[in-house]
Amino acid sequence: MTATPADEVGTFISDGVDTAKEVISDNMPLVFGVAIAFVAWNIGRRVLGKI
């Protein structure tokens, strides 16, 4: 059976999705760490501003 253009596009999309999932799973701890640090910094700034 020969590959049709639709099959090739489907393969490219599948490969792209797999790559995106790998990037997200690799970088998610960093993203959450930065977000938590930002929230903590804002809370600390508010608390120290009231002292």
Image: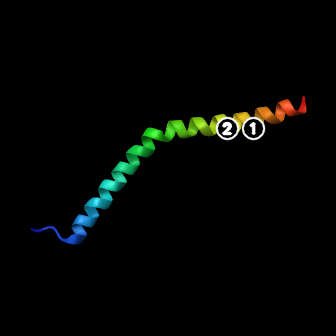
Residues at marks 1 and 2, CA–CA distance in whole angstroms = 6 Å
Q: Picture coordinates of residue 6 (x, y %)?
A: 24, 70
Residue at image location 60% in from the left, 37% down from the top: 34
Q: In which quarter of the image is residue 2?
A: bottom left
Residue 6, numbered label = none
**Left or right of 43 in this view: 19:** left
SS at circle 1: helix
Residue at image location 40% in from the left, 50% down from the top: 20
Identify residue type, mark 1. Asn
Colour scheme: rainbow
Q: Picture coordinates of residue 43 (x, y %)?
A: 77, 36
Identify residue type, mark 2. Phe
Q: Picture coordinates of residue 19 (x, y %)?
A: 35, 49
**Left or right of 42 in this view: 25:** left
- What quarter of the picture does the N terminus occupy? bottom left
SS at circle 2: helix
Residue at image location 41% in from the left, 44% down from the top: 23
Q: Nearer the viewer, residue 51 or 1?
A: 51
Residue at image location 34% in from the left, 51% down from the top: 18
Q: Which residue is situated farthest in the right direction here?
A: 51
Disc tally is: 2
Q: From this view, report whether residue 20 is shown above or below residue 27.
A: below
**Left or right of 23 in this view: 10:** left
Q: Nearer the viewer, residue 45 or 1?
A: 45
> Which residue in the protein does label 1 denote?
42
> Which residue in the protein does label 2 denote?
38
Q: Picture coordinates of residue 38 (x, y %)?
A: 67, 38
- Asked if disc 1 and disc 2 are in contact, CB closer than 8 Å, the reply is yes
